Each structure stands twice: as C-alpha cells, then as structure tokens.
Image (cartoon, rainbow, N blue to C red):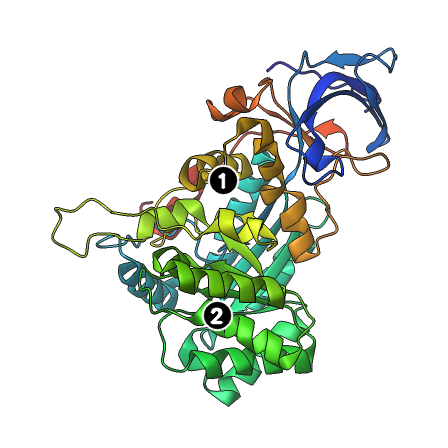
Amino acid sequence: MDVIIPADGHYVIANASVPVSVMGNASSGALARVDITIADGLIAAIGPAGSITALNIIDLDGGIVLPAFVDLHTHLDKGHIWPRKQNPDGTWLGALMAVLDDRTVNWAAADVERRMDFSLRCAFAHGTAAIRTHLDMAPPQHEITWEVFEAMRARWAGRIELQAAGLMGPDTILDPEKLRAVATRTKTAGGILGGSTAVHPENHTIMRRLVEIAGELDLAIDLHTDESPDPTANALECLADAVIEAGFTGKVTAGHCCSLAVQSDDVAKRVIDKVARAGVAVVSLPMCNMYLQDRDNGSGVRTPRWRGVTLLNELKAAGVTVAIASDNTRDPFYAYGDLDGFEVLREGARILQFDHPQADAFVWARAVGADAAAIAGFAHSAIIAEALPADLMLFGARSWTELMSRPQADRTVLRGGLAIDTTLPDYRELDDLMGTR
C-alpha cells in the first residue's frame, strides 16, 4: 500500500476501518469507518468517515488501522542462535539441551547484546511497541543477562517498551539460596519473577515458594506452566491454588498451559475455574507450541495428533484475560519467526480457531494489543483514542479475510505519527557470531 505521510506530521487518515475493540469497546468485533486526525505525534481527533476536512488527507478507502503491537512473551536472549545450534530432533527436550549447550559456551554479554538488538530491530520494523522477554537465569547467567537487558531497555526507550522475567527451572526454585539470588537481582532490575515447570512431584511447593517471594519483594509473576503433552501436568492448577491460598494480589501470568488441552473435560473445567478465580492471565504461544508439542521422538514416521495449544477460547469464555505472543525466534525451541505481531495474530487465527464467526473476529486484535498491554501493565495501551500517541499500522486490507490472506509486508508503520523505515536487518550481520564468517 502506497501511503505518503506529510513531513510535518499533521494530516488526516480518512475513511479508515478500525476495530471497535481497539477503540474502547472490548467486546465488539465490528469495524468502524472513521477519520483520524494526527498532529504533533498524537491522535488529535477521531470522527465518522467524511466528517473531518483538512488540507492533508490520506484516504485509506476502507483500509484497516491497528495500534502498534504488544508481544507479551518472547525470548530475546535465545534469539537467532539456530545457525550455530539447531534442535537435533525438533522435540522440547532436544531444544532444552541444545540451548543449555549454547548458553554455556557462547552467551557472553557481547553475544547476547547483539542478538537482542537484532531481534528488537526486527520487531520495531514490523510495528511492535512493547515486548516482554523471558531471560534464562541459571547462575551465573542471571548477572550477565540482566546487565545486558538493562542497557538494552535504556537504548530502546521511546521505541520499544521493554519488560523482562527471570526464567528459572524447578531446581533453582527449590534451592532457597539460588531462588533468593535470582529474585533479588530481578527486583534490582525492575523485572518480573519467572519460572518453568510442568510434570514435577513438588509443583505445590514450587508455586508456594514463588508466590511467597514475589509477595515479599513485591514482584509480578510470569511463568511457563505445563508446556507438555502430559495430562498429569498440574503446574497451572498449583499456581492458581497458591495465588488463592496466599491472597496474592500482584499480577500473575501463565504461559503455554498446553496440558490443559489433553486433560479430561472435568479436570480442564476445574482448572479453568480456579485460574479465573485466582485472576491469573494466560498467554498462548501458538506457533511455538504447534512446532514443539506432539513432535516425533526420533522414529521419523509420525504426524502430530494435536495442535499443542491450550484451551484459549474456553479460558476467555470463562472470564480469563488472554493473549497470544511470538515466543521463541530462530532458536532450538522454534526454528522460525521474526517477532512480527501480525504473523502471531494471523497464525493464531488458524491454529486456535478464534476466527468464527468472522463478524466477531476483530475482538482478537486485542490479544496482540490492548489485552496483552493490560496484563503486563505497559504504558503503551494499544488503544486508538484521542490524545494518545499515533503509534499505528495502516493496511490496505479492508476486511478480516483480506487482512488474514496475505502477510501484509507492505503495511505502513507509524510511530508518533511519522512513518518509520520498515527495512528488516540482514541475517548476515550475525554471521560472525554463528561461525559462518
């Protein structure tokens, strides 16, 4: 789509189709035809199509406008290591071991910093304004990576709002000394308490300890829970129980929750009811979950039987705040991806089947926008309203099916009302880190 933005940043985006869900009515899937006045980097006015007259008018002819994306669950420290450390068999365990090997050998500060910056430039070009990343915290990595993240957060301020969760495995969480060391460093960095567990005999203890130290240090919680095809995995239920029992009032997010989809209807309903009661938000990672879950374990002759994703539609229907996000990018956990929020929305519609009835589908624009922003507490609200920053994306597509049928590589990305350069960085920049140059 050929859109020319006036250099002074004062103009009207006319005849635009905007989801009502991103203009304040979260439950509406309708598109509204509006005129949007942009001035001094802000949305100065919004009116019905044809109601605003000005010298500089850009007629979108029904093209869709969305707010800049929010990517609630990523792994910037792992990103783009695939060329030097592939997943040998495509399984979750294969990914875990490959990342452990690469982290031990290569994750010095300079390596992590360059790959993080590369990833952020990709996300920015695609139209993302806020990202939460999980950071591996196996000591001593918690000291190296937090420093890199703090520097990156300062460097990208004003372009991408950054949050980070310190990611710990069960062994670290169950070791009081290590848990406190990571939690304390996380607090110093203004971070979020993270962790990962699925099938584990001490999940109740793990969740109680996480909730206790989060309460003590006034930390939000964002965990990988039940990233597994095993129906006996109970981390999500244990998390909800721990939050309810402790009366914890901080923000709590659970990612993945894959096992919920392979549990019996009775168990799934019980867990979903507890999650709703505990106020736990759930983020699904549709692309990575489908890539890893139900993967062949080595025979080479097997097609997956399920999609790997959680019961996101049922969670949302039960009143749980939900979102979808990128997860990993070109690393052993996911060989693909580019931190493109639109790709997440597009593939999420296919994988999670939230696209029908299509008259209501645009409610799900909030899953990579306003709902994700609310879960995280980002300053970027991903709402289109008067007096808010004009951080927008303009598409030529006029309907859900037009929007979802193409990658929309020609989208126009506005930050502060001005068009940014959407040229993506070249992978060759990382060749020396990958040992290919």
Image x and y of residue 224, in percent: 47, 64
Identity of the residue drawn at 87% across and 10% down: 55
Q: Which mark is residue 237?
A: 2
Question: Is residue 114 something that shows in the picture?
Answer: no
91 displayed left or right of 138: left
Image x and y of residue 82, in percent: 34, 50
Image marks 1 and 2: residues in contact by CB distance under 8 Å: no
Name the residue tied to disc 1.
344
Q: Is residue 316 above or below residue 386?
A: below
**Occupied quadrant, residue 364:** top right
| Mark nearer the N terminus (1 vs 2) | 2
Three-letter residue code for mark 2:
Glu
Q: CA distance from mark 1 to mark 2?
A: 27 Å
Q: Is residue 71 above or below residue 190?
A: above
Image x and y of residue 302, in percent: 16, 47
**Mark 1 or 2, which is nearer the eye?**
2
13 displayed left or right of 350: right
51 displayed left or right of 415: right
